[in-house]
Amino acid sequence: MKILVLIPARGGSKRLHRKNIRCLGGKPLIEWSVNTAKLIPEVCDILVSTDDIEIQNIAQELGVHTPWLRPKNLSTDHSNSVDVALHALNWYESEHGTIDGLLMLQPTSPFRDVEKVKEGIKIFERQGVNSVLGVSHAHAHPGWLFKIKDSVLNSFLDKHELNTRSQDLDPVYAINGSFYLISPSALRREKSFFTKQTLPLIIDSSMESLDIDTEQDWQYAEYHLNKMLLTKR
């Protein structure tokens, strides 16, 4: 099993300036994902896709692939992660040969557990599926959500679910952004990480599924890290 780890790390960020190389616990944010990837036996290479020379230099210091700067059309606020993944995949396979899976680890999930990543790869390998996505229990059930039309609240789904007890509703899950594993053929065919054969990697830990996107998220990550350090003393 040959897995290529892709760490997408754009230089710009609207809500949290330079977050991908902002120091968390004394090391740049991307280093957390790089260090996790280095502990996975199935990983044949780690590739950081960036448009930023400073991020590229840091990635090189960490000893991972960063052979080019990402094209400008793949580096905007509206760039699609699938297009970024395909760009990296096509380059890698043209230079280094075919792989069995592309594992995208977003740097904004620094606390993912190595054993959980290994579990996701085992699901992918043993079940022979197209993709595995990291998911967590959703905070709100869609049956209890609303949309506003003409200033009036309307139930988002079937109205009968509004009167159903929470414990009687089917559990629902949300993609948490920490784990995306897909076969190259499925990514090229579907142009998506989600396919009809996608299996879940259920992540119960709120910290493992943390996706740092705002200053509040960052402060929460620092609080958790400090709490971990105090526990170890």
Image (spheres, helix red, strand yellow):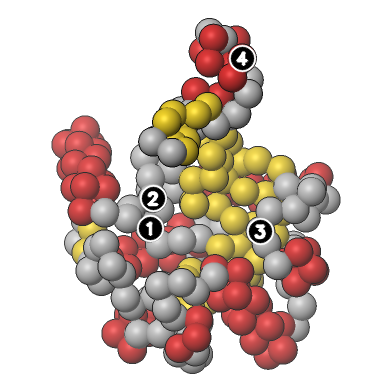
Quadrant housing residue 89:
bottom right
Q: Residue at x 26, y 62 (%)?
A: 15
Q: Earlier in the sequence, mark 1 or mark 4?
A: 1
Q: Earlier in the sequence, mark 2 or mark 1?
A: 1
Question: Marks 2 and 4, Cα distance to the nearest angstrom?
Answer: 33 Å
Question: Marks 1 and 3, Cα distance to the nearest angstrom?
Answer: 18 Å
Along the viewing direction, whichever of 104 and 14 lies nearer the viewer: 14
**Amino acid type of disc 1?**
Thr
> Which quarter of the rendering shows the N terminus?
bottom right
Other-residue count near label 3 (Cα within 10 Å), few / some / many at <14 / 14–19 / ≥20: many
Report the residue marked by disc 1. 108
Report the residue marked by disc 2. 211
Along the viewing direction, whichever of 20 and 162 lies nearer the viewer: 162
Labels 3 & 2 near each other (Cβ < 8 A): no
Q: With 232 as the anchor, is 1 left or right in this view? A: right
**Amino acid type of disc 4?**
His
Report the residue marked by disc 3. 193
Eye-nearest disc, 4 or 3: 4
Disc ID at residue 160: 4
The answer to whether any part of residue 139 appears in the image is no
Disc ID at residue 64: none
Labels 2 & 1 near each other (Cβ < 8 A): yes
Along the viewing direction, whichever of 196 and 207 lies nearer the viewer: 196
Q: Earlier in the sequence, mark 3 or mark 2?
A: 3
Quadrant housing residue 110:
bottom left
Q: Secondary structure at mark 4?
A: helix
**Amino acid type of disc 3?**
Phe
Eye-nearest disc, 2 or 4: 4
